[in-house]
Image: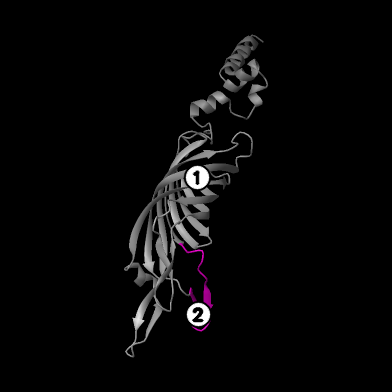
Amino acid sequence: MRTRPAVLALLCLCFAQIPSARSWAQDPRRAWDPSPSRDSVIQAGALPEDPTSPGKFPNIWSLDILLSNDGFGLGTIYRRSLTPDVSWFASFSISESKDEREVEYYDYYYGTTVSPGKLNRFMVLPLMAGIQFRLFREDIVDTFRPYVNAAVGPAMVYMMPYVEKVQTSDGLTYYDQMDFFKAIGRGHPHYTFGGYVGFGANFGTQRSSIFGINFRYYLTYPMSEGLPSLFDERNGEVKATKKNFGGFIISLNVGTAF
């Protein structure tokens, strides 16, 4: 019976060496809590970063698909966040512009689209820099991020011939539609200045992937003399010029943030 005190002392020593048992003795609830404490998460550096922080994904590179009454276009945008609500960006795009007096017809015999009386094609290439401001960040869900934006910068209007004058061996003259790639080599650049204002939104929860839509209205400084756009096919004289190369455009944005 003398060994009983020694056995009890040994059990107490073993009990003191078990951390879980000691912590349970101090606070029984703590030993059964499976979730890590905030202090341990902070020490491990595993706290998620605020997704609205400009340091999360400060850079965005996106491709723009442009849709308008004049046709399609392509563009690209680089954007960098300054604050959770304000960003600056630079954009470049190329799109077609037409005279609003043009009339297109589909030629079923040749399977092509023709515009009688059209003299020149116009490609507009603006290089813009601007500011974007996010709206209602603290009031609506983060999967829908509306914004307004505005930009200014120089623009080049590249004018290419739509038709070429052909003279037959019999002395007859007619105008034939020129191939697009052939017309590029015969074009001439013209320069102006412009900008746009717009509003849009980005969608989704993945901040590293960008998908959104932007409605823009482009304003260009009118060219004083204008560029010849339509002509009289009977005598070959220019009958209309185009001075303004702005208009309404819908832009679909697809890109990545890093």
Of the residues shown, which amino acid type is indicated by label 1?
Ser
| Apparent side of residue 153 relative to residue 45 in the rendered image (left or right) | left
Secondary-structure class at tag 1: loop
Above or below, comparing residue 79 to residue 26 in the picture: below
Disc 2 on helix, strand or loop?
A: loop
* Apparent side of residue 88 relative to residue 167 in the rendered image (left or right): right
Q: Position of residue 247 (x, y in %)?
A: 51, 55
Q: Quadrant of residue 14?
A: top right
Q: Residues within 10 Å of mark 2 (few under 14, many from 20)?
A: few
User: Residue 111 got which mark?
Assistant: 2
Q: Picture coordinates of residue 168 (x, y %)?
A: 34, 87
**Residue 214, position as x, y percentages in the image:** 54, 50
Q: Quadrant of residue 36?
A: top right
Tell me the magenta residue range. Answer: 97-115
Q: Is residue 227 magenta?
A: no
Residue under label 1, please give it: 208
Question: Which mark, by number, is residue 143?
Answer: none
Identity of the residue drawn at 51% across and 66% down: 101
Residue extending farthest bottom: 170
Quadrant placement of the N terminus: top right
Q: Nearer the viewer, residue 254 or 187?
A: 187
Residue 13, above or below 48:
above
From the image, state whether disc 1 or disc 2 is nearer to you: 2
Image point (49%, 36%), residue name: 86
- Separation (CA) of disc 1 from disc 2: 44 Å
* Badge 1: residue crowd in 10 Å (few <14, some 14–19, many ≥20): few
| Residue at image location 56% in from the left, 18% down from the top | 17
Given the image, on which type of amino acid does mark 2 rest?
Gly
**Residue 92 appears at what percent x and percent y?**
41, 52
